[in-house]
Image (spheres, helix red, strand yellow):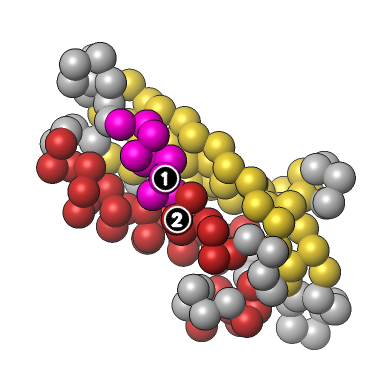
């Protein structure tokens, strides 16, 4: 029986959209959903997966996304939920394929969601990408 594992993260970073606003901070939320058939009671090593995702998030924390060299030029040009969702999907899918699939061939990245929130945590909107 296939299971889904949901992991949630948050980080603070600022951005601006060309022609619309001055740089300002947000709380960004990331949800990663991985699916697969459990082997020995688990889909994968959750601690290891969390560490891989944190490694992707860490360079973004407290940064100005428009100038963050970790991101592609397309994301830096317009750092939105849509572009960040695609960034995380591409990065994490590559990690899943290169590392975790070797341990459990049924594993797949199911979806990525990125939400943008005010600094008090109130969500303004979110985008989810599905496999």
In the image shown, does 44 or 130 lie closer to the viewer? 44
Q: Residues within 10 Å of mark 1 (few under 14, many from 20)?
A: few
Residue 114 at what x, y percent from top left?
A: 59, 50
Is residue 47 at all visible to an observer of this figure? yes
For disc 2, the neighbor class at 10 Å (few under 14, some 14 to 19, many from 20) is few
> What residue range appears in magenta?
45-53
**Magenta run includes residue 52:** yes
- Where the N terminus falls, by quadrant? top left
Q: Position of residue 98 (x, y in %)?
A: 20, 54
Judged from the image, the secondary structure of the residue bearing numbered disc 2 is helix
Give the label on residue 55, or none. 2
| Foreground of the two, 27 or 61 | 61
Whether residue 129 is visible here, answered yes or no, is no
**Residue 32 inside the magenta-drawn segment:** no
Q: Position of residue 54 (x, y in %)?
A: 48, 50
Identify the residue shown where x is 64% and y is 46%: 10
Using the numbered discs, state the Cα–Cα distance from disc 1 to disc 2 in whole angstroms.
6 Å
Left or right of 81, for residue 90: left
Does residue 47 lie above or below 92 as drawn?
A: above
Q: Nearer the viewer, residue 68 or 124?
A: 68
- Figure check: 67 above or below 56: below
Say whether residue 100 is left or right of residue 91: left
Residue visible at 54% across and 65% down?
59
Q: Which residue is mark 1?
A: 51
Numbered marks: total: 2
Q: Secondary structure at mark 1?
A: helix
Q: In the rendered image of this protein, does residue 4 appear above or below residue 109?
A: above
């Amino acid at each position: 029986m296939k299971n889904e594992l949901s992991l949630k993260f948050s980080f603070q970073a600022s951005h601006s959209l060309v022609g619309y606003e001055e740089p300002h901070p947000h709380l960004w939320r990331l949800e990663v959903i991985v699916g697969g058939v459990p082997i020995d009671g688990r889909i994968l090593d959750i601690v290891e997966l969390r560490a891989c995702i944190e490694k992707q998030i860490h360079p973004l924390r407290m940064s100005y996304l428009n100038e963050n060299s970790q991101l592609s030029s397309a994301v830096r040009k317009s750092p939105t939920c849509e572009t960040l969702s695609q960034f995380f999907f591409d990065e994490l899918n590559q990690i899943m394929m290169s590392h975790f699939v070797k341990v459990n061939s049924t594993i797949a990245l199911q979806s990525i969601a990125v939400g943008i929130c005010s600094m008090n945590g109130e969500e303004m909107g979110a985008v989810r990408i599905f496999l």
